[in-house]
Every structure is written in C-alpha cells, then in structure tokens.
Image (spheres, rainbow, N blue to C red):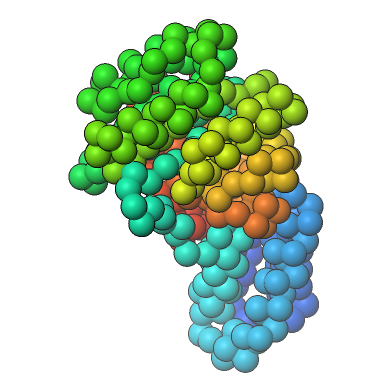
Amino acid sequence: MFEALGQRFTSIFSGLRGKVSQARLDQFSEEIKTALIESDVALEVANRFSAQLAEKFNQNSDEINISINPAQKIYELVNSQLVQTLGGATRRLKYAKNPPTVILLTGLQGAGKTSLAGKLAYYLKSQGNTPLLVASDLQRPNAVTQLQVVGDSIKVPVFAPEPGNGVGDPINVAKAGVKFAKDKLHNFVIVDTAGRTGVDQVLMQQVIDIRDSIKPDETFFVVDAMIGQDAVRTAKAFLDGVGLDAVILTKLDGDARGGAALSIVELTGKPIIFAATGEKVTDFDLFYPDRMSSRILG
Ligand code: GDP
C-alpha cells in the first residue's frame, strides 16, 4: 500500500548529502509534507507532521550538524515522527477481568468485517484462547452463512440462531451469544454486526442498542483502508455516534496510497489495533506502528 510514498521518501532522502543547512532542512520538511499530501494524507495531519518534524530538527540541530552522517540522524527523526503519527506503541487487546472478553465489531458493509471476525477468531485461537463467533449481522445477504463457513474452516464455533437475510433480531442474538459464551466457558466472544453502504442513523442506532445490551469490553471499527479519506470520515462518524476503542484497517495489501492509515489515529484520537493484509485468515496481525514506519521508509 505504501509503495508510492516509500518511493517518494527514498528519493527525498537521496537528495540529502554531506552537510545539511537549516534552509535545506526546512526544504526537506516541505518535501515530506508534499509527499504525504500526495499520498492522500489529510491536509491537517500532513501540516502537523511537517511542523513537528521541523521542531524535532530544531531540537537536534547540533547533533545533525556534527554528525558525519546527517542523513542517518534525519532518517531517525522522520521515523520517530512517523511512528508517533501511526499511534506510537502497539495497542494490545484488553482482557475482561471476568471472562468472556466481549468484542463488538462495527463498520460499513464491504469493509471486510465478517472476514475480519474469522481472522480475529483464528488469531485468538492460535494463542490458546477459546473464542466464540456470534452472527448478529442479520442484514447482509449470506452474512450468517459466511460466518459459519469461516468458523467451520478454523474450527471456531459460531452462535447463529437466526438465518439472517433480514430475519431475526440482532440485539437478542448478541445478548444470547454472550450468555452462551459465558455458559460454555469461552474466554472471548466476537460479535459481528450489520453494516450499511453508508453511515446512517438506523445503523448507528442498531449498533448502539447492541452495545448497550452486551456492554462490550472492546468496540472496534473495521474500515477498508482502500477508501482513503472516507475511512477517516466514517471512523469519526462512528466515534461520535457510537464510540469506539480502536480501529481495524483491512485491505492494507491493496494499492491505495496509505492516507487512511496515516491520518486515522490523529484525526480520531483512537489507535489502530489490528491490520488485515489479504483474504486468508492468516493475513492478519496486530498493528505495529514501528514496523509500518520501517516499511514506509524502506
Ligand atoms: P463485510 O460486509 O464488512 O462483512 O465484508 P466481507 O468480510 O464480506 O469482505 C468484503 C470483501 O473484501 C470480501 O470479498 C473479502 O474477501 C474482502 N476482504 C476482506 N478483507 C480483505 C483484505 O484485508 N484484503 C483483501 N484484498 N480483501 C479483503
């Protein structure tokens, strides 16, 4: 996803040779800002990035001046600014004091939510947990069957008392699913909910009702990184309407320019916890800001 930005950064860095004057550093910060904007990073995030970078250059000007390899020092400062913009430390899952830990997945239709539920279940199971998937997306055609198929393939049970396709009450299913998990001693419950093609009040209200009835330990907003700045806009709408604890980015394997990943943390104030990078259940991991930054910088 960050290929174009990575190439731009490489070419900007290759222009840094020998001693680097203050004027050259200022120009460098401007070049970085332009590269970010061209990668679909929100204007205010790109502006803040370059201002904070310039500040870092100022604070470290002595070190940059005396260094035999100023480009290396500058690289370290850009890296640390990128890591900060991507959220700093890796956000890890919070476990409930009394199991099960209840995870509510929200997001727009097509974001990759149902596939993500499977990926997250597989990830948790491979760490020795006993997750239960709950099929509360009773809207999208075949969402229940899709969850059952993915559950079967990873040997994770799926609580799906309703057929979906418009039939059944998602709030009752979510509540009964959490109770079932408690009774059967599952230590995680992942509740898949319905999305809409766009943010709307009915969707928000349904998620609010589910949230209020199951009191999740974690509410995650799943969003397709390919939709760029719309990802940030919908995340903000969900944050304001429903509240969320962290964001999960999907389709990071796509060829979008990466603006969503680089803007969403600053503009929502919420961390990215997981990232999906493909259609397979294994194409999924915690989101590591430092690794992502290294990937961008090459
Ligand atoms: P939902 O409507 O949010 O439940 O979306 P789905 O889980 O059905 O996913 C929509 C489409 O995106 C499916 O074709 C998935 O295979 C695909 N998909 C989901 N996550 C990823 C990803 O990380 N990378 C790619 N390339 N495709 C994905």
* Front residue of 156 and 178: 178
Which residue: 26% across, 19% down?
A: 152
Above/below status of 87 relative to 3: below
Residue toward you, 18 or 93: 93
Q: Quadrant of residue 111?
A: top right
x then y, percent, for residue 40: 71, 43
In the picture, measured across the screen, residue 44 lies left or right of residue 226, that is right
Number of labels in the image equals 0
In this view, 88 is above or below 232: below
Q: Is residue 286 above or below residue 253?
A: below
Residue 163 percent across, percent down from the top left: 44, 9
Residue 183 coordinates in the image, percent (x, y): 27, 35
Residue pictured at 39% horizontal, 29% vertical: 177
Q: Does residue 167 appear anywhere in the picture?
A: yes
Q: Residue at x 32, y 48 (%)?
A: 99
User: Which residue is depicted at the point 51% across and 43% down?
Assistant: 215
For residue 112, say whether it is visible: no
Left or right: residue 234 compared with residue 224 = right
The quarter of the picture where the N terminus appears is top right
Q: Is residue 152 left or right of residue 101?
A: left
Query: Is 4 in front, or is 108?
Result: 108
What percent of the width, then of the height, locates residue 34?
A: 75, 54
